[in-house]
Amino acid sequence: MNQPEDIVNKLSELGYRLTPQRIMILSAIENSNDHISAEEIYAQVMAKYPHVNISTVYRTLELLKRLDLVTETDLGGGRVRYHPAEKGHHHHLVCQECGIIIDLDESLLTSLKDALLREHKFIADLRHLAIFGRCVNCSK
Amino acid sequence: MNQPEDIVNKLSELGYRLTPQRIMILSAIENSNDHISAEEIYAQVMAKYPHVNISTVYRTLELLKRLDLVTETDLGGGRVRYHPAEKGHHHHLVCQECGIIIDLDESLLTSLKDALLREHKFIADLRHLAIFGRCVNCSK
DNA sequence: ATAGTTTCTGCAACCTTTTGCAATTACCAT
DNA sequence: ATGGTAATTGCAAAAGGTTGCAGAAACTAT
């Protein structure tokens, strides 16, 4: 598994400044076991750097998203979650009943992307999709 | 094409009160040619009923969504859009480059839903999806 | 080490949407 | 028509996220 420094290095390579705030934001994202929200990132960075501003967190996330270094997804719950792009490429099924989140690998989406390309010449950008519905236990 | 009264009647049938605000909100939705935002609905209702509150609009939209009378989708642009559920069931392709919105009928999503049911026993709730990517003109 | 440049950040205001609470009112029974 | 009930609404605050602007600071050249 790649180290946080890899994204840091990549930012530098791409000509972006490495500020303390950014390094800490990147650490928070990389150190999270799962998806992490902006508010959670902010709280972790605040613990070490009380002057950081929430708008800096959002701006950094926007930059990382644009550079394909993180992916964002809406798993419900009223806030967006983030995830390092390099930590596997996958999607999720979210049960609207019990809230369970099921990992979904790329292959099922691949046929959709292929069909969109074939029939609409559209290149779908399905990076981190969340599909809502009802799971096996809740569909009775 | 169904008349606004149909949804009004359905609300009544389901035991919900028909308030002037709701009737006007429903009219605004039904009378829109395309997708309509909460803010646009609010502006239309405000024109005839200056005391209506934006939170009433959001609450009514939430109710209609829950009752499958409208569908909501995020076509980008920083706000959610709504659309009568009975006015055809479809999805969209949204080009991140030029912003064009391409209608996408149900059939391409049907195979995805079938696969999710078959391989995960998951009943996907794909009511009004927006898939982002790049269109034929922007994929060069 | 210093100065210059340009990116980045903090601040405060703003936007879209949600929520708790008390007052209003649609509906129903009489 | 009247009274009662409970759903609905308006209000104001709040939540998650965005943005303009001016000052701070990362980076580079000397």
Image (spheres, coloured by chain):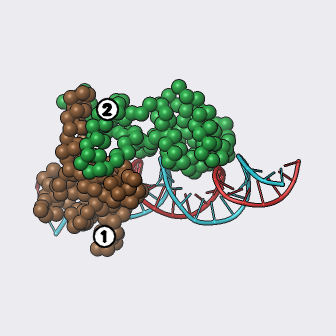
Chain colours: A brown, B green, C cyan, D red
Percent position (x, y) of residue B12?
A: 63, 42
C25 w.r.t. A7: above or below: above
Q: Are marks 2 and 1 in contact (CB under 8 Å)?
A: no
Question: Could you say which is closer to the camera, residue A136 or residue A42?
Answer: A136
Q: Residue at x 52, y 31 (%)?
A: B32
Which quadrant of the figure has residue A26?
bottom left
Inspect this view and state whether residue A20 appears. Answer: no
Question: Could you say which is closer to the camera, residue B69 or residue B92?
Answer: B69
Percent position (x, y) of residue B77?
A: 40, 41
The amino acid type found where label 2 is placed reads Ser
Element type at mark 2 = helix
Number of numbered discs present? 2
Locate the N terminus of chain A and report the quarter of the image it occupies. Answer: bottom left
Q: Residue at x 16, y 63 (%)?
A: A4
Q: CA distance from mark 2 to mark 1?
A: 45 Å
Determine the residue located farthest toward the front in the rendered image.
Answer: A140
**Chain of the residue where label 1 is placed in the rendered structure:** A
Is label 2 on the same chain as label 1? Answer: no
Q: Which is in the foreground here, disc 2 or disc 1?
A: 2
Q: Residue at x 21, y 57 (%)?
A: A84
Determine the residue located farthest toward the bottom in the rendered image.
Answer: A47
Residue A44 is tagged as: 1
Identify the residue position indicated by label 2 in the image. Answer: B107
Question: Could you say which is closer to the camera, residue A112 or residue A60?
Answer: A112
B33 w.r.t. D2: above or below: above
Element type at mark 1 = helix
